[in-house]
Amino acid sequence: MSAGKCCRVTSIFVLIVLTDCATVYAPNKSGILNEGLMLTCSYTLEIGETFDSLTWARKRNSDEYFIDIVKFGSGEPIYYTSSFDLRNRSTLSKVTNGGNINITMLICVDEAQFRCTVEYTTGGTLRNQQSTMVVTIHGRPEKPDYLIKSPGEYAEYDILTFDCRSVVGKAPLGIIKWEGIRGSVAQDISGDSEVVNERVTPGSCTRTFISRLTRNVTRNDNGLVIRCRTTHTIYQDPEDYLDSPRLVVNFPVDAASLSVSQEPDLPVHDVGNRVRLVCRTTSVPASTYIWRHLKSNKTYKQGIDGVMDLVNVQEDQDGTYECEATNSYLNLTFTAKKTTTVNIREYSLIS
């Protein structure tokens, strides 16, 4: 925005100084696509200055120069023929020391420079002052319309890509943000993304982005939800996001994640009691378990439970028990083993 101001100084024999000044003010404006916006121009005249007319001109990006669109004079304000795209969606209001254009529905071509020129008479001379304003139109960002991930079955350390498309409003005010959601915790993972396609959205004064997230997945990503969110510094809707299904990342069973335990956790168990052997691991797909009593070479298949109960335990059931956990994916089979020793004694009363 620029405010126009002029001063003319007339000196008569350097004894009398007469000054005349006029000021014009048209502030910059920002509006939302399909909503309304008032363009205002006001002026001040000094004593001895007489208003003649106020003219609005417009210079769009496609224009080489300013083109007159509206004029306020002594009678009713008028539209010039060059304002054909404006007259059916605006009204003109002549106010004290000003003339306004009330646009009832903004469209993209309204994003332009507007110049307000006030002509006035002072000392018998027709003079003018101008003020130029800039109108910025923001199309509202929208919820992403698709979120696509790499097809197929995923294994640990695979590289996955996710593509998300959204109308973001105006860059850089609007962007696509990526988040990893686990439970109620959201982590910003946008650093692994890039915009792979950007274009002006026809008729909307906005830009459409396609953002690609590239992620080298690990077992820690199993169960993770990938969220693609449209964010905008001015017009933010918290519901403008899409979520992926929870990630299923296959990873092998290994000795580091395998644990075995006894319940109750005692160094020695009495004959006749129950001893529960528990084998647990984390793997995707879930592991199946086999228990072996190494002394008797007996094998007990426990499926995906991993729990074996020794009911009414006897002395011949003591010794080392080995848990073997197995899982398979992508035509590969993985196995891990771990042992625990069960000590059993004959219970006796001491008199």
Image (spheres, grey):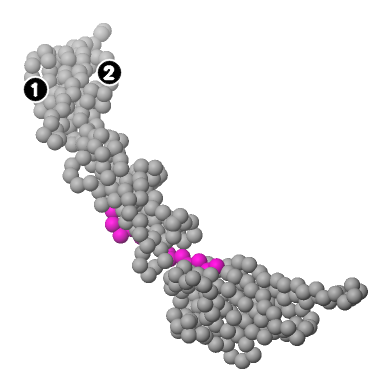
Q: Secondary structure at mark 2?
A: loop
Q: Which residues are magenta?
A: 134-147
Which picture quadrant has residue 284? top left
Residue under numbered circle 2: 266
Q: Give the residue displayed 28% in from the left and 42% down from the top.
A: 223
On screen, 89 above or below 229?
A: below
Q: Is residue 137 magenta?
A: yes
Q: Secondary structure at mark 1?
A: strand
Left or right of 169, for residue 257? left
Q: In the rendered structure, which amino acid carries the disc numbered 2? A: Leu
- In the orientation shown, which residue stands out farthest toward the front? 13
On screen, 322 above or below 46?
A: above
Which picture quadrant has residue 278? top left
Q: Give the residue displayed 27% in from the left and 15% down from the top.
A: 267
- The answer to whether residue 274 shows anywhere in this view is no
Q: Nearer the viewer, residue 117 or 222?
A: 117
- Percent x, y for residue 35? 46, 73
Q: Nearer the viewer, residue 77 or 309?
A: 77
- Percent x, y for residue 251? 22, 33
Q: Is residue 189 magenta?
A: no
User: What distance separates the C-alpha of mark 2 from that of mark 1?
Assistant: 24 Å
- Tell me, for residue 299, which label it has, or none: 1
10 Å crowding of disc 1: few (<14), some (14-19), many (20+): some
Left or right of 28, for residue 23? right
Q: Give the residue displayed 64% in from the left and 90% down from the top.
A: 74
